[in-house]
Image: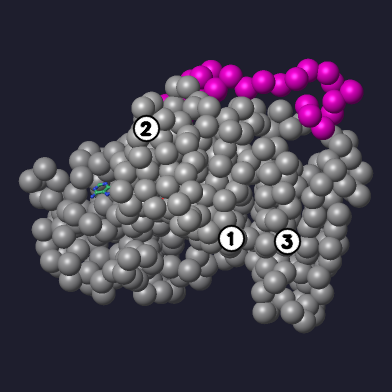
């Protein structure tokens, strides 16, 4: 431990970007502290991934029962208030468990919002904590449209806490949070309208697959308004009205502003101590180091090309653990990071996209999911995948839309990340029957 400071490493923010590396770092003998102003664990467990996927579980069951009608006969209705209570039960112990895991590893937990006093000192409620190295891991918060009446709109955090699901819901934006929450709300029975900024939903995903998912959502009653040009929100009696487009008006009961997430870089005194950042987040070099030598940043708060998702935050946190414990001196090298949209069907991908320039001269294999006997067992009638092989027959990209796309892509991940040869692929004997066996059958 450095004798001049309270801690070797001090993390500002207690999400995945901090706690995944803080625990291991304390376990190897470094003096570590984490400062968190909200709930331990940050966005993902409390108001992101874990919470959302719990709300999605009955949608999956509903879709399964729908496909199997005739073999099963029950009409699955989702009780929203029971579902929200269930979600709360699933997630409520997570912050305590995460905090306990950190404490047991030897990490000191400091509760409160911190800001820089100088480059080695963070103030929390006027108490100073010093450290040799500081990691900024303050994440993102929901964007709010800058229009009249924006205070009438809600965030994804609010959606997941609703005790009753409003009848008519407007969702502004068509990124992954919008599409997932629209899917859930529609399955529960709400009338959902998605107002799009342009005319492309999920622009980071392979559009021919996105269009099929959008068509399915439309068939189920979700409306899409393209190039909506939202002008204002107004309260009219107990309803809300949305002014958009060319003098158009839509009346709804509830509005979700899902127009993106912005970096938590304010109120930290970053400018005062000279840390560089853009509106996309904090600027770092290949060691996740800011322009101030002893200050690093990790997770969603970074200005970076990689997807702002939990696996990225975890990877960065683990990288800093290795760097700070002198197990590596190398710059960070990101693996292919997979991502999914939990619509129903889902869209998932890893590595090269079929429409990327690099994939142009490669071998692309198109598969129709319903042709696979394993996907016939629960009567999957839609879905496609595209696998991309380089000239040495390494799998370098895979994208799929289907009911189990996230599992299919996850199982292919090692082949993409470790560049498996055909010989190595045959070394893996998957449990049969399973989604892994089904997905691997297509790449060997
Ligand atoms: C609705 C939703 C669904 C999502 N679904 C998925 C998914 O399915 N899969 C996936 O991979 N990712 C998902 N994500 C993204 C995922 O949650 C984030 O990528 C991940 O949480 C990033 O971790 P982080 O540690 O960088 O930031 P966060 O988890 O946001 O942690 C930052 C923490 O810093 C704290 N903080 C901020 N300022 C201060 C301060 N000054 N002092 C002290 N503490 C401070 C905040 O309170 C927060 O707890 C979802 C996000 C949302 C919103």
Question: N-terminal of the two: label 2 or label 1?
Answer: 1
What's the image's color scheme? one colour
**Disc marking residue 322:** none
The answer to if 70 sits in the magenta stretch is yes
Q: Residue at x 68, y 62 (%)?
A: 207
Question: N-terminal of the two: label 1 or label 3?
Answer: 1
Q: Which residue is mark 3?
A: 208
Q: 118 or 400, which lies in front?
A: 400
Q: Locate the C terminus by quadrant.
A: bottom right
Disc 1 residue lies near ligand 1 with CB under 8 A = no
Residue 21 visible at all: no
Circle 1 SS class: loop
Asked whether disc 1 touches disc 3, contact meaning CB atoms under 8 Å apart, the reply is no
Magenta-drawn segment: 65-93
Q: Which quadrant would residue 318 be assigned to in this image?
A: bottom left
Asked whether disc 2 touches disc 1, contact meaning CB atoms under 8 Å apart, the reply is no
Residue 320 visible at all: yes
Going by the image, does 420 lie left or right of 151?
Answer: right
**Disc marking residue 236:** 2
Q: Is residue 364 above or below residue 391?
A: above
Residue 10: percent from left, percent from top? 25, 53
Q: Is residue 187 above or below residue 37?
A: above
Please tell me how many numbered marks the rendered image carries.
3
Q: 273 or 178, which lies in front?
A: 178
Badge 3 crowding class, 10 Å Cα cut-off, few under 14, some 14 to 19, many 20 or more, is few
Circle 2 SS class: strand
Residue 386: percent from left, percent from top? 78, 62
Q: Which residue is mark 1?
A: 199
Q: 190 or 375, which lies in front?
A: 190
What distance separates the C-alpha of mark 2 from that of mark 1?
Answer: 29 Å
Q: Residue at x 33, y 52 (%)?
A: 147
């Amino acid at each position: 431990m450095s004798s001049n400071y309270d801690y070797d490493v001090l993390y500002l923010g207690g999400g995945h970007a901090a706690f995944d590396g803080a625990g291991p770092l304390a376990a190897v003998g470094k003096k570590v502290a984490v400062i968190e102003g909200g709930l331990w664990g940050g966005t993902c467990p409390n108001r992101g991934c874990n919470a959302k996927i719990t709300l999605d579980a009955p949608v999956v069951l509903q879709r399964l029962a729908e496909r199997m009608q005739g073999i099963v006969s029950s009409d699955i209705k989702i009780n929203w208030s029971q579902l929200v209570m269930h979600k709360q039960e699933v997630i409520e112990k997570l912050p305590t468990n995460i905090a306990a895991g950190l404490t047991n590893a030897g990490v000191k937990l400091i509760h409160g919002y911190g800001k820089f006093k100088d480059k080695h000192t963070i103030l929390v409620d006027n108490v100073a904590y010093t450290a040799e190295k500081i990691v900024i891991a303050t994440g993102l918060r929901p964007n709010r449209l800058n229009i009249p009446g924006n205070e009438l709109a809600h965030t994804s955090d609010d959606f997941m806490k609703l005790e009753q699901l409003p009848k008519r819901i407007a969702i502004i934006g068509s990124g992954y949070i919008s599409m997932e929450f629209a899917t859930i709300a529609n399955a529960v029975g709400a009338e959902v309208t998605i107002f799009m900024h342009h005319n492309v939903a999920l622009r980071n995903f392979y559009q021919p697959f996105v269009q099929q998912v959008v068509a399915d959502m439309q068939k189920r009653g979700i409306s899409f308004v393209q190039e909506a040009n939202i002008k204002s929100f107004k309260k009219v009696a107990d309803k809300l009205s949305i002014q958009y487009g060319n003098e158009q008006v839509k009346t709804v009961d509830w509005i979700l502003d899902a127009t993106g997430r912005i970096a938590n870089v304010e109120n930290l005194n970053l400018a005062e101590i000279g840390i560089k950042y853009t509106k996309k987040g904090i600027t770092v070099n290949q060691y996740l180091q800011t322009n101030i030598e002893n200050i690093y940043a990790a997770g969603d708060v970074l200005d970076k090309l990689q997807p702002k998702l939990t696996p990225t935050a975890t990877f960065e946190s683990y990288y800093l653990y290795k760097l700070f414990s002198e197990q590596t001196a190398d710059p960070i090298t990101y693996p292919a990071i997979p991502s999914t949209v939990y619509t129903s069907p889902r869209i998932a991908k890893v590595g090269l996209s079929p429409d990327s320039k690099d994939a142009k001269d490669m071998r692309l294999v198109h598969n129709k999911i319903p042709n696979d006997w394993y996907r016939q067992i629960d009567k999957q009638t839609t879905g496609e995948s595209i696998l991309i092989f380089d000239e040495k027959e390494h799998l370098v990209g895979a994208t799929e839309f289907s009911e189990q796309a996230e599992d299919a892509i996850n199982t292919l991940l090692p082949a993409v990340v470790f560049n498996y040869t055909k010989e190595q692929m045959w070394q893996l004997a998957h449990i049969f029957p399973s989604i892994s066996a089904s997905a691997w059958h297509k790449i060997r």
